[in-house]
Amino acid sequence: MRLTWISLACCTAIAAFVSGNSAEARPPYLAAFKETYANLADKAAESKCMICHFGESKKNKNDYGKAMTTALGATNVKDTEAIKAALKKAEAEKSSTEGKTFGDLIKAGELPGKNPA
């Protein structure tokens, strides 16, 4: 009986570890992005957290993620209007694509974030 409980605990721990890596943008951020930029809604739904992040860690922010962090001015903002205002503010910032702002990329139908080289 004890072996059964140990096996069950190990399986549960492994399942939690494996499934824990599926990152997604904070729901209010992703919803505001898709609502604000309807032309990118499908790409945003596919990319999710990768609009602002790269790699395995949520701490890794691409250039757009850094611009959004600055525009938001706080972490884990839940106010939809504040998030939308930050999206608009970030549009004016220079992207890592030479000569283009994030707004230029968005208008061209591209997701704004670029991962560091």
Image: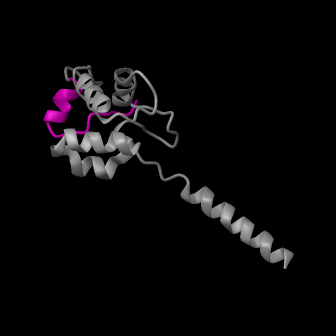
Residue 112: x and y, percent? 27, 34
112 within the magenta span? yes
Query: Where does the N terminus fall, quadrant-wise?
Result: bottom right
**Direction from residue 48 to residue 18 in the image, left or right:** right
Rendered view: 95 above or below 28: above
Foreground residue among 72 and 100: 72
**Direction from residue 72 to residue 35 in the image, left or right:** left
Residue 106: x and y, percent? 19, 34
Identify the residue at horizontal 24%, vertical 44% (top origin).
34
What is the residue that sits farthest to the right in this orientation? 2
Identify the residue at horizontal 51%, vertical 43% (top origin).
56
Rendered view: 58 above or below 100: below
Identify the residue at horizontal 31%, vertical 52% (top origin).
46
Helix, strand or loop: magenta stretch: loop
Query: Where does the C terminus fall, quadrant-wise?
Result: top left
100 within the magenta span? no
Foreground residue among 33 and 43: 33
Residue 111: x and y, percent? 25, 39
Residue 35: x and y, percent? 21, 43
> What span is colored magenta in the figure?
101-117
